[in-house]
Amino acid sequence: MLETSYEKSPNIVSRKIAEETVLVPIRQTLGEEPAIFTLNEVGARIWELIDGKKSVREVCETVISEFEIDPHVAEKDLLGLLAQFKETGIIREK
């Protein structure tokens, strides 16, 4: 999983509001509940780093160096966040 790259769904727009980044779907299927995602500073940085080119490992290493987070905690939290993103369709495997 660490060598996988992800890209953002074209159906999501992001906006920075105060200290948070908000992700909003611009298209939904009939009957689908609207979902808005709010990201903190670390989550927002991860969102910025998802570009379809960087591997999960590269994203993790960047987050560790920029936020001085324990590597094991960073990897676990990153994989959890990416799983949520993937499950909700806001990212897809490249």
Image (spheres, helix red, strand yellow):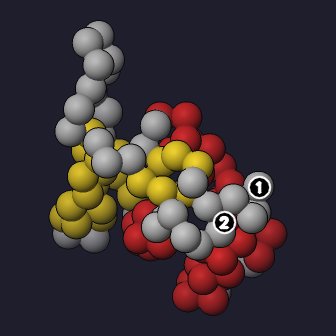
- Report which residue position mark 1 lands on: 1
Is there CB contact under 8 Å for labels 2 and 1? yes
The foreground one among 76 and 61 is 61
Residue 68 position by quadrant: bottom right
Give the amino acid type for the residue marked by disc 2 in the picture: Val
Q: Is residue 74 left or right of residue 67?
A: right
Q: Quadrant of the C terminus?
A: bottom right
Residue 66: x and y in percent read 55, 88
Q: Is residue 30 above or below residue 46?
A: above
Amino acid under label 1?
Met
Residue closer to the observer: 14 or 20: 14
Q: Nearer the viewer, residue 42 or 13?
A: 13
Give the spatial CA distance, label 2 vs label 1: 7 Å
Q: Position of residue 27 (x, y in %)?
A: 23, 32
27 lies above or below 30: below
Residue for point 29% across, 19% down: 29
Residue topped by disc 2:
56
Mark with earlier residue (2, 1): 1
